[in-house]
Image (tube, grey):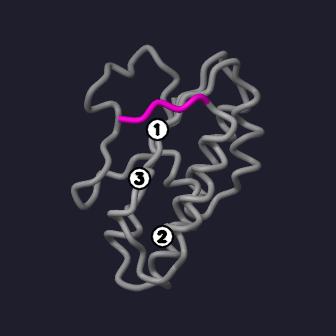
């Protein structure tokens, strides 16, 4: 499991809050909430890029010893500034790929473009994945 959820600003939560992850290969790091924490477009983008680098490092760890199931919590944190193509390449290494993603309009950016990039990437994922919406 790759957990990208930030625990800042009242959004997101690590799955370890709700699940016993002791038996899982559980990879996480300190992720930020760019749209909530960033003071302006430049800081939002810097936070998004830092998140993408951390997330990509965790996805590469999965690739070192892939498992049949890959679950990614809050994949949109990576998609703000990361590569959809790389994510899809990683997902193909698993037999089952599960991901949670934000798909809404309530969280807007401050001009960085990450909200639109996120929306487009999630729509691309929805074209090739089975979708369950809450």
State whether residue 37 is above or below residue 71. Answer: below
State whether residue 57 is above or below residue 51. Answer: above
Does 60 sit left or right of 33 as displayed?
A: right
Question: Which residues are drawn in magenta?
Answer: 130-134
Q: Nearer the viewer, residue 80 or 26?
A: 80
As helix, strand or loop, the secondary structure at mark 3 comes to loop
| Among numbered discs 2 and 3, the one appearing first in the sequence | 3
Q: Is residue 32 magenta?
A: no
Q: For residue 30, which numbered disc appears in the image?
A: 3
Q: Nearer the viewer, residue 109 or 34?
A: 109
Q: Residues within 10 Å of mark 2 (few under 14, many from 20)?
A: many
> Residue 85 at what x, y percent from top left?
76, 49
Nearer to us: label 2 or label 1: 1
Q: For residue 100, which numbered disc appears in the image?
A: 1
Whole-number angstrom distance, CA of label 1 to CA of label 3: 18 Å
Nearer to us: label 2 or label 3: 2
State whether residue 104 is above or below residue 59. Answer: below
> Residue 40 at what x, y percent from top left?
40, 85
| Residue 127, image quadrant | top right
Nearer to us: label 1 or label 3: 1
């Amino acid at each position: 499991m790759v957990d990208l959820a930030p625990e800042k600003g009242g959004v997101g939560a690590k799955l370890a809050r709700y699940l016993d992850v002791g038996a899982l290969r559980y990879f996480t790091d300190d992720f930020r909430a760019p749209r909530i924490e960033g003071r302006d477009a430049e800081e939002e983008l810097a936070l998004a890029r830092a998140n993408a680098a951390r997330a990509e490092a965790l996805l590469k760890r999965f690739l070192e010893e892939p498992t049949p199931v890959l679950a990614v919590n809050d994949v949109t944190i990576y998609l703000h500034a990361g590569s959809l193509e790389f994510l899809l390449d990683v997902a193909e290494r698993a037999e089952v790929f599960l991901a949670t993603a934000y798909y809404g309009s309530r969280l807007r950016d401050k001009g960085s473009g990450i909200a639109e990039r996120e929306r487009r990437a999630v729509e691309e994922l929805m074209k090739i994945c089975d979708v369950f919406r809450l």
